[in-house]
Image (tube, rainbow, N blue to C red):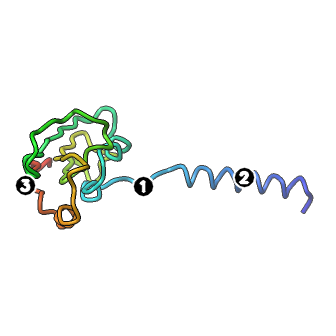
Amino acid sequence: MTSRHARFGLIACAAFLLCACGSQAALAPEAARGQTLDVLNQHTPASAQVVVQDVSTIVDLEPSYPVGAPESWIILAACADSATIDDASYVEVSVIPAESTTRELRGRIQENDFRPTVGDCS
């Protein structure tokens, strides 16, 4: 193999790695639980309707959404009219301020205890 061919092979390999690493996996509604709204925003199509329910009363706080940056809100439950948020035209999430989460609350999020705080979405 000539050095010219070797160089082309390295360039093609580097281009493949950049493309493969740059893509992110689709986000299922179940996987959105415990994430912040900025993660949801990275996956939601611009044309999708997104409903955000502030359920801060669960942690004895007054609802205050949309105050604060997206990364300051934790998703308790999510649903979408598609298998993934990335392909959805309708997404609904319930959120609380990230600062109010505790270890116990994170466990309840993962157990899907807050599923009733969002609709059906189908």
Residue 25: numbered disc: 1
Amino acid type at image mark 1: Ala
For residue 25, what is the image quadrant? Answer: bottom left
Amino acid type at image mark 3: Pro
Mark 1: few, some, or many residues within 10 Å (few <14, many ≥20)? few
Secondary structure of residue under mark 1? loop
Amino acid type at image mark 2: Ala
Residue drawn where x is 18% and y is 66% of the image: 104
The label nearer to you, 3 versus 1, is 3
Q: Where, quadrant-wise, is the N terminus in this rendering?
A: bottom right
| Marks 2 and 3 close (CB-CB < 8 Å) | no
Residue 13: image location, x then y, percent: 70, 56
Residue 116: numbered disc: 3
Q: How far apart are marks 3 and 1 (CA)?
A: 26 Å
Who is closer to the viewer here, 101 or 115?
Answer: 101
Q: Which residue is at the far right?
A: 2
Secondary structure of residue under mark 3? helix
Reading the image, the residue beneath label 2 is: 12
Secondary structure of residue under mark 2? helix
For residue 54, what is the image quadrant? Answer: top left
